[in-house]
Structure formats: C-alpha cells, structure tokens
C-alpha cells in the first residue's frame, strides 16, 4: 500500500508546488527499485485524473516526469494581472519603485515569459537528468536557509500533543470525531455516533504553525483554512450551538462553508469577523500594529471584539485595516491577488517597505533580520518571486536592485 505522505508529495510535485525537501524525499523513493510497482500505481491514478499526459507507452520513469513538467510549463503561464508591476526579466524581476512604469508593460511581458520559461525548463530539466540518469539526489544550494514546509503541532483538549509533518500520517478517533492527518493537511469529521447524538460541551483543539511552516485544515463543518507561518488557530472539534467560533493569531485564508443558521465568527485580538459563507484572508500577527482583512468572495462584518463594536461591511476586492491601538477601521479597494499570493506559492509586494517585506520573509524562512540603518528599512519595493525558492535566490533577486546587500551567517541576515 502506498504511503499517503508519498502520494501527497507526488501530487504536489506534479502541480509544481513541492519544495526542496519534498523533491529529495520523492527522488529517493523513486530511485528505490523496490517501489517501482507502487510508482506505476501512482502514475495510473494520476493519469486517470488528467494530471499526467496519457501516453501509450512509458519506457522509463524519468520520461513520465519529464513529459509532465513540460506540459505544466506550457499550460500554466504566469497570470499577467497578478504581476503587472514586475518590470524586469528572468530572475532579476524585483525593482525599486520609481514611478509609473505601465508603458513598459507590454514589452516586459513578452520578454519575461520567454526568459522565465527558458530558465525554468533548464533548471527542472537538469534536476531530472542529474537525479534520475546519474542516480543522484537533487543538489541543494550551499546557502543553508531553506524555504518553509508543511509542519504543525496539534494540541488536543485532553492534553495530548502531536507533531505533524509532511511524512507523518495520523488518525485519531475520539468517539464522536475522527481526526485524519495526511502529510500537509488535517481534517475533522463526525463519526456515526456523533451524527446520532448531541454533545453537550464544546471541545477545542489548537493548531500551532511554527516559523518556517504552513498547514491546511478542514473543520468538521467543511470550512477550509490555509494557515501561514508563525500562526495559531483554536477551534471546536465539533460546532455546537448557534455560532461557529474560532480564534486566530497570525495569518490564514478561510473558505467558510455556508450555514445561514450558524454564523462563522473569527476573533483575532481586538477584531472580530462574522460571516455566513465566504472567502477571505486575515493577517493578525502579535507583533503587527494592525489587523488586515481582505475579502475575496461574499460579505463579512468587521468590528471590535469587545466594547463598542462600530461594525463595517466589507465587500469583494475590499480590504480593511484595523489599528490595534484605537480600534479604528479603514477600508480600501485592492487587488486581492497580492494578499493571497502566499496561498498559491508566491510572494508579491507592491510599493512595500523593505522592513515589512523582510518581516514576511523572516517568518517563512525562519531567519532573524537586522538592518544596518533605518533608511534602508524604509526603501519601497515592488516585485515578487516563488515562495518555495531557496533564500539564496530571493537574496539575488532583491540585490539585483543594487540598492542594498545581504550579509548572512547561519540564520542571521544583516541588510546594508
């Protein structure tokens, strides 16, 4: 029987969302000749789903993966709207903001797609050839700062603690609830006993995501939550009563299952959000001065979690910012793709200070960042890059602006 963790990594690989550690695990597993039969089972399964080109004959495993990578590169171009302000080619597409650059947009996209496709093809192609034909593991950059990966700590009501990683499968039955952890995700479902009986007390679990981590959670009502690094979500095992209440510190993207009779309420410090069924991103880290809510679909009501509410209604493509100090709320129209880029494996910053950019990156790469002077920290940048890049690549992109340099020792990053 194929391990669920291998299946999850294989699927992420096909979708081009796997990180270096996952690639290493997958290649090691594939290179073990004893797994050839299970590999063929995976290929058959994903071929039926349309995730792999349906060829009549695959002489070698490497040919299958190679064909898949080529297809993915050709069929999934970068969205132009999402990165319309990235104005340089290839890996040098991180620019200091210098004003209105829209007139360069058409030329840029023609050049960027060609160069990016070439670079990606060369990188992936060499990785596959080196790993499969030479029977070697993929080479990882010498810079020892790796991107984050799926990992979390689960705290149960009864005091038990479970460490969740990409290589661990987990099944817990509490009598009324079945908890299933599979690699990068965990889900809750009511057992038959719970469906026929009614619990009297709410039982809460907490999912803690460390720096350098991320995780996916599906609640018992079907609500889906993508949780970012350095975040903590507390939630009921089963929802009882007239409300569905959860509490978040950090960042998460919610797709709330509709239930008009039971509003979904997210409390995050001084802010409270009430929804019936919608999609939104919430950023509320303890060391931030503000709480940011970005609405993708539906409607949400936002107010203070205590005292005079002063609620406002947020509509799609709107973003609210609540000042923690005084509870004041300001709304504006935004391009939501910037706020939720992290969920789809990207970073995107528009006219953002280097201080805020490095705060985001420090959580994902689990690094400690210091600026040589405050002037550098206030520089404004627009640009983006892949979330699962090694930090050396990110460093090169930012340094290409020629406005600053990085000095790195272990997990300490000094920007000059």
Image (cartoon, rainbow, N blue to C red):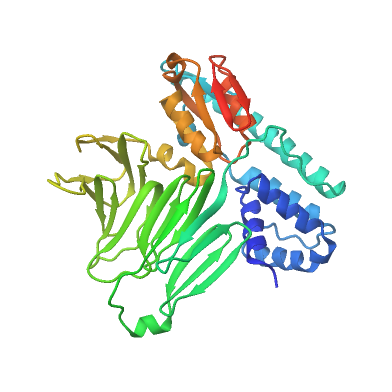
Report x, y in % for residue 67.
74, 50
Find residue 283 and report its horizontal and vertical position in percent: 36, 42
Name the residue at 40% across, 64% down.
Answer: 219
Relative vertical location of residue 118 with respect to residue 372 in this rendering, above or below: below
Q: Is residue 2 visible?
A: yes
**If the image is split into quadrants, where does the C terminus sit?**
top right
Q: Is residue 340 left or right of residue 114?
A: left
What residue lies at 82% left-to-right and 49% top-to-bottom? 132
Q: Which residue is most to the right? A: 134
- Residue 173 is situated, as x and y percent measured from the top left of the image, at 48, 76
Q: Which quadrant does the N terminus fall into?
A: bottom right
* Residue 393 placement: quadrant: top right
Residue at x-position 83% and y-position 46%: 136
Q: Quadrant of residue 195?
A: bottom left
In-image side of 121 versus 341 (left or right): right
Residue 396 showing in the rendered view: no
Above or below 80: residue 208: below
Q: Residue at x 56, y 38 (%)?
A: 365
Q: Position of residue 342 (x, y in %)?
A: 48, 42
**In the rendered view, would you say 51 is above or below 381?**
below
Please say if 212 is above or below 401: below
């Amino acid at each position: 029987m194929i391990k669920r963790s291998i299946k999850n990594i294989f699927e992420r690989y096909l979708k081009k969302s796997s990180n270096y550690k996952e690639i290493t695990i997958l290649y090691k597993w594939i290179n073990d000749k004893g797994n050839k039969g299970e590999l063929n089972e995976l290929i058959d399964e994903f071929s039926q789903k349309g995730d792999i080109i349906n060829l009549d004959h695959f002489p070698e495993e490497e040919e299958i993966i190679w064909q898949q990578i080529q297809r993915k590169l050709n069929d999934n171009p970068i969205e132009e709207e999402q990165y319309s302000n990235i104005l340089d080619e290839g890996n040098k597409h991180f620019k200091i903001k210098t004003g209105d650059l829209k007139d360069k947009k058409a030329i840029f996209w023609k050049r960027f797609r060609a160069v990016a496709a070439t670079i990606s093809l060369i990188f992936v192609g060499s990785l596959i050839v080196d790993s499969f034909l030479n029977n070697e593991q993929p080479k990882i950059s010498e810079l020892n700062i790796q991107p984050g990966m799926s990992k979390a700590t689960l705290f149960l009501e009864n005091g038990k603690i479970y460490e969740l990683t990409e290589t661990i499968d987990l099944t817990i039955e509490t009598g009324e609830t079945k908890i299933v952890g599979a690699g990068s995700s965990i889900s809750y479902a009511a057992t038959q006993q719970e469906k026929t009986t009614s619990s009297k007390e709410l039982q809460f679990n907490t999912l803690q995501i460390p720096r350098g981590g991320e995780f996916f959670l599906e609640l018992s009502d079907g609500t889906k939550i993508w949780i970012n690094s350095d975040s903590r979500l507390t939630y009921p095992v089963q929802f009882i009563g007239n409300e569905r209440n959860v509490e978040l510190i950090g960042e998460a993207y919610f797709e709330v299952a509709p239930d008009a009779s039971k509003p979904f309420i997210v409390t995050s410090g001084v802010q409270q959000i009430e929804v019936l069924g919608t999609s939104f991103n919430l950023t509320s880290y303890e060391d931030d001065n503000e709480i940011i809510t970005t609405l993708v679909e539906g409607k949400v009501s936002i107010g203070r979690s205590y005292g005079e509410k002063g609620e406002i209604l947020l509509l799609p493509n709107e973003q609210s910012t609540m000042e923690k100090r005084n509870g004041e709320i300001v709304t504006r129209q935004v391009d939501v793709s910037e706020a939720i880029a992290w969920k789809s494996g990207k970073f995107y910053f528009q006219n953002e200070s280097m201080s805020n950019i490095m705060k985001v990156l420090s959580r994902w790469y689990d690094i400690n960042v210091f600026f040589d002077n405050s002037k550098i920290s206030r520089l404004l940048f627009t640009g983006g890059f892949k979330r699962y890049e090694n930090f050396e690549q990110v460093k090169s992109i930012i340094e290409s602006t020629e406005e600053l340099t990085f000095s790195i020792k272990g997990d300490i990053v000094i920007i000059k």
